[in-house]
Amino acid sequence: MCRSSGNADRVRGLEGSVAVSRILHVGCGAEPLPEWLSRFQEEVRVDIDPATKPHFVRDMLNLHDIGTYDAIYSCHCLEHLYPYQVPRALKEFMRVLNPGGAAIIVVPDLEDVRPDTKPLVNSDLGLICGLDMFYGAHTELEACPYMAHHCGFIESTLRDVLVEAGFVNVKTLRLMNYNLCATAEKPVE
């Protein structure tokens, strides 16, 4: 994940010169914001699972009236949507971002992954294999079926879907442990 120091060093600065006031943490789970995003004065947490105790229990496809934000951070969330839902979620991100605000998105990087059982990454969920990267962590799916993966990304597909949603200054970066990070900005109208 982006939390490892090697990834943090590579990602730091990608988020640009966005104001450092409010960040919306979409799909927060129980995880805090990574340390490299600690410059934000206020974190508002959103998750579909009320057990994670977010500020708002919301589906990322409809964030409702939750205010506007200088940045959005979404780590390992978009892959839980079906491909036709990803543009809708990104439109919601765009809607709640202030003009010039940044979206910082991390998803599994499937570019060099085969859907097999060969272990690829040791994570807090245990050993993650290619099948887990494609379909969701098998250790979690029975208890949390909404953790299934319904789509996947490589660098070009993540970049394209952000551009199609209207984001500008889109940058992507392949990270360690099969992570892909993108930053994008809402145009200053």
Image (tube, grey):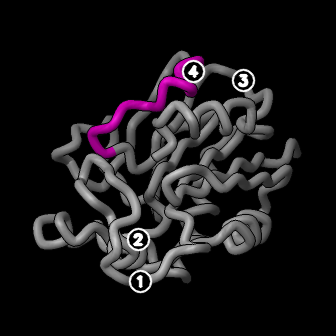
The quarter of the picture where residue 163 lies is: bottom right
The mark found on residue 19 in the picture is 3
Sequence-wise, the earlier of marks 3 and 1 is: 3
Q: What is the magenta segment's predominant secondary structure?
A: loop
Q: Mark 1 and mark 2 in contact (Cβ < 8 Å)? A: yes
* Percent x, y of residue 39: 59, 17
Q: Secondary structure at mark 3?
A: loop
Q: Residue 115 — which label?
A: 1
**Crowding near the residue tagged with mark 3, few <14, some 14–19, many ≥20 C-alpha atoms within 10 Å:** some
Looking at the image, which is closer to me, 144 or 126?
126
Task: Name the residue type under label 4.
Answer: Phe
- Residue 176 point in image, percent of width and height: 55, 50
User: In the picture provided, is 12 more to the left or to the right than 139?
Assistant: right
Q: Which residues are magenta?
A: 29-39
Give the foreground label among 3 and 1. Answer: 1
| Nearer to us in this view, 80 or 67 | 80
- Of marks 4 and 3, which one's residue comes earlier in the chain? 3
The residue indicated by pointer 2 is 133
Looking at the image, tell me whether mark 3 or mark 2 is earlier in sequence order: 3
The mark closer to the camera, 4 or 1, is 1
Sequence-wise first label, 2 or 1: 1
Q: Looking at the picture, how far across and down is residue 66, in whole percent?
A: 47, 41
Q: Residue at x 79, y 62 (%)?
A: 166
Task: Give the number of the disc on residue 40.
Answer: 4
Secondary structure type for disc 4: loop
The quadrant where residue 126 appears: bottom left
Q: Amino acid at mark 2?
A: Met
Q: Nearer the viewer, mark 4 or mark 2?
A: 2
Cα distance in 3D space between marks 4 and 3: 8 Å
Residue at x-position 73% and y-position 55% = 172
Q: Residue 35 magenta-drawn?
A: yes
Q: Indicate yes or no whether the magenta region holds residue 179.
A: no
